[in-house]
Amino acid sequence: MLQLDAVETVALGGLALLGGYALCRAIPIFRRYNLPEPVVGGLVIALIVLFAHGQGTTLFELDTTLQTPLMVAFFTTLGVNASLALLRISGRQVGIFLALATGFVVVQNLVGLGVASMFGLHPLFGLLVGSATMAGGPATGLAFAPLFEQAGLAGAESIAITSAMAGIVCGGIVGGPVATVIIRRWRLKTPGGHPTEVPDVTESKVDPPQTEGQREFSALKSIIFIMVAMWLGAWIGKGFEALGLTLPAYIGAMLIGAVVRNVDDVTGWIGLPLRTIDLIGNICLALFLSVALMNLKLWELAGMALPLAVNMVVQVAIVVAFCVVVFRAMGKDYDAAVMGGGFIGFMLGTTANAMAVMRTLVQRYGMAPRAFLVAPLVGAFFIDFTNALIITGFMNFAR
């Protein structure tokens, strides 16, 4: 059996990540449903470990010391993206869409708790297969999994990734057809045309070209900012613990990132290099997911298949029904229908799912600029804040 230290574990995670990219490029169905490359690569290793376990062999022992810092670093950069200025760009529409998504997060958790009660399982199972892995996707599910393990839910990481992956696949399959039915059922007027490119409207500004020295300083400033935010966030976490609240490790750092971003938007004192921070965050997320998935003990899922399947069916059914509510609330027009498809995409998985669903629709029916402003702003940034707070509230209530 190999004994890997912290650096060797992350290195193996990096190799698994590259393998995930190779598989997603080589297998069309993986691209079609936007399966995350770190998840694919990590799961391949987890499946190999599962096979070896069935043969009575342990391949390696991982030192996951760096897993939590990678996760906290990613969520810190996510906090930096939570700009109130972006929220005001399309104020009323973004606010309504965020309110709908936040309300639906509560519904997802209630459904999960109902399924857990039906099968006589720990209530935390219901929360984990609710918004933690539906609206939250793999990252949020795995971030909360250690807390659920500590509270008595065995196999939380394996449950989290299984639920999240099922949600991603279902969201990619269901979102487009449901939006298409709405477009046809209400005979909506579509703009026509087949755009070759969909702009990324979530970017608040375009940074000018940089010299090599400027790029180096941007990277240095980004890394230092992320580390200081993690440092201060850890103190905030200790403060919450002193109040008797159970919170995931990233909440404090994410809050610091959000506060500094919004102060910087007003004052310009720091000049946060947003693109560089995003790049660092994406790398940290990829490595975190890859390492976390390699360490999954899939044999712990024995007996959970039926509850997971029932939960998935119910979650898909209610998000499809709620899509009509989203369509009506967002204006009952073509853009609202496209937003409904995006809503299904990110409420069952990730923002990448939502973007893929909406891109498919606009390539067929024509541009939907309002949808591509509102849905990514809520799905990529703001819902993570409200979701984390709601999960934390449910979790502290269910303890």
Image: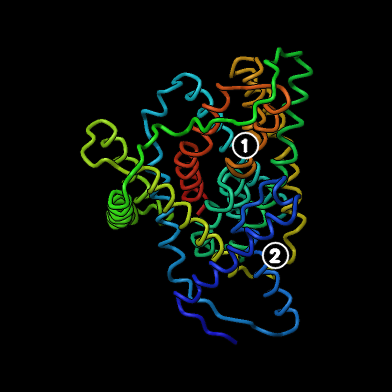
Which of the two residues, 76 or 359, is positioned nearer the viewer here?
359
x and y percent of residue 227 in the render?
A: 31, 57
Q: Quick check: can you spot residue 239? A: no
Q: Quadrant location of residue 325?
A: top right
x and y percent of residue 236 in the render?
A: 30, 52
Query: Which residue: 59% across, 18% down?
Result: 329
Disc 1: CA contacts within 10 A as few (<14), some (14-19) or many (>=20):
many
Q: Is residue 315 left or right of residue 15?
A: right
Report the quarter where the N terminus lies. Answer: bottom right
Q: Is residue 206 left or right of residue 160?
A: left
Can you identify the residue that label 2 sits on? 301
- Amino acid at circle 2: Leu
State the SS at label 1.
helix
- Amino acid at circle 1: Ala
Which of the two residues, 111 or 39, is positioned nearer the viewer here?
39
Q: How is the image coloured?
A: rainbow
x and y percent of residue 52 in the render?
A: 71, 80
Can you identify the residue that label 1 sits on? 354
